[in-house]
Amino acid sequence: MNLLWMALGLIVTSVSLGIQSVVQPQNIYKYAVYTSFLYLLGAWLASCSIADKFNANFYPRTASFIITIALGFLYYYSQVVDDITTRVYILCIGLGVLQILPSRQILRNKPIDDRVELLLYWLYVIFCVYTMVRPLIFFSLDNLDLSDLVRSQYWFFTLLGSMIVCMIITFLLLACSIRTAFRKLTEERNHDPLTELLNRRAFKESAEIYLNNPRSYPVSILVCDIDHFKKINDTWGHDSGDDVLRYVGLTLRQSTRNRDLVVRIGGEEFLLFLTNTNLDVAKNMAQRIREKLRSDRHVMAVHEPITMSFGLVVLKEGERLSDAVKRADIELYKAKNLGRNRICSKQDLEISV
């Protein structure tokens, strides 16, 4: 959407440039209010593009107020008193203020960590400041004649500088948009759409990175399964089943650390890949998850608790990931066969009460 705002701003500005280019120099004051309005509108649309990129406010009321005040002065210095120098000052200040409107909120929202986005932001701010002060720069030059605006040095360098900066900003916006699109595609590829947990493919890729780092060990693997999930679907419908899956996924995320991997293997089965976690710590984590699910009874239609069975193993030195997951699956089946709602490991067995 930010590219659309920028495109609209450039189109509106181009229309104004076209009008000024074809009008006779002695008549340019007659169209000053109209062309200035298009310039101001184009500047606000450009600010909307940046605001949309960084999730900031567009400030439509403030922009309308600034445009109205600027046009009032521009009308006076074109239709009442023909003073092109003053018009240039007023227009440039109005353009710069409109463009810089969202900049403060952008910085207040959250720190910009991405280098490309940071470059985009500061280049835009510098361009806004330059827009406001450029009349002072050019009018300090000797013999600057504005009687024929479109053939003046001011017009040439203003157009050249603005065109170059706008092209750079547009390319940066395009680069950010393309990267955002790729990130979204990667997120969709790597995550289960219902629970927003990692899927099998993403889990294998991420787990291998951890397994190749000696600092990740010990690694514990928990394979867990919602008890009697088929009964939930058959009795209360698939919508209720989906609610349970989403809630379990949320509970698993909230009960683990940022460095842990939480995976939906398929159906009602999940996996926790816990780095720097020994057997006892992993078992305590599983127990907290069971207690939380059991205590929250608002998810099920009849306010029954959700229970899960867990199979727990610690990855052996040099063991393949797939083999460790198979061992955890065996422990999970033991928990199921022993009555469900249990945590089973090779070394120990814990039974829910």
Image (cartoon, rainbow, N blue to C red):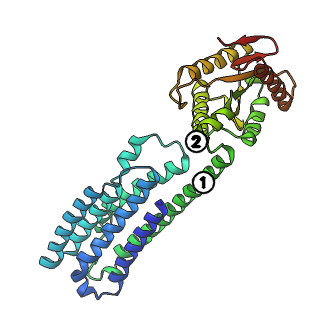
Q: With respect to residue 147, does 108 lie above or below?
A: above
Q: Nearer the viewer, residue 126 or 194?
A: 194
* Residue depicted at 17% across the width and 73% down the height: 75
User: What's the amino acid at mark 1?
Assistant: Arg
Residue occupying the point 61% across, 33% down: 249
Report the residue at 74% width, 18% height from top.
339
Q: Quadrant of residue 45?
A: bottom left
Q: Quadrant of the C terminus?
A: top right
Q: Nearer the viewer, residue 286 or 65?
A: 286
Q: Earlier in the sequence, mark 1 or mark 2?
A: 1
Q: In which image quadrant can residue 82 be found?
A: bottom left
Q: Nearer the viewer, mark 1 or mark 2?
A: 2
Q: Is residue 346 visible?
A: yes
User: Are there few (<14), some (14-19), or many (20+) residues within 10 Å of tag 2?
Assistant: few
- To which residue does mark 1 refer? 179
- In percent of width and height, residue 114 lies at 54, 45
Quadrant of residue 212 within the rendered picture: top right
Residue at the outermost front position:
235
Q: Position of residue 202 (x, y in %)?
A: 72, 41
Q: Mark 2 belongs to which amino acid?
A: Asp
Instruction: Work out whether 26 lies above or below 348.
Output: below
Please name whichever residue, 166 or 349, is drawn nearer the observer in this view of the structure: 349
**How many numbered marks appear?**
2
In the image, taking residue 39 as reference, residue 272 lies left or right, namely right
Tell which of 120 and 330 is nearer to you: 330
| Res 144 visible | no
Q: Secondary structure at mark 1?
A: helix
| Residue 315 image offset from top left, x and y in percent | 81, 22
Report which residue position mark 2 lands on. Answer: 239
Residue 234 as seen in the image, left or right of residue 20: right
Judge left or right: residue 196 versus residue 158.
right
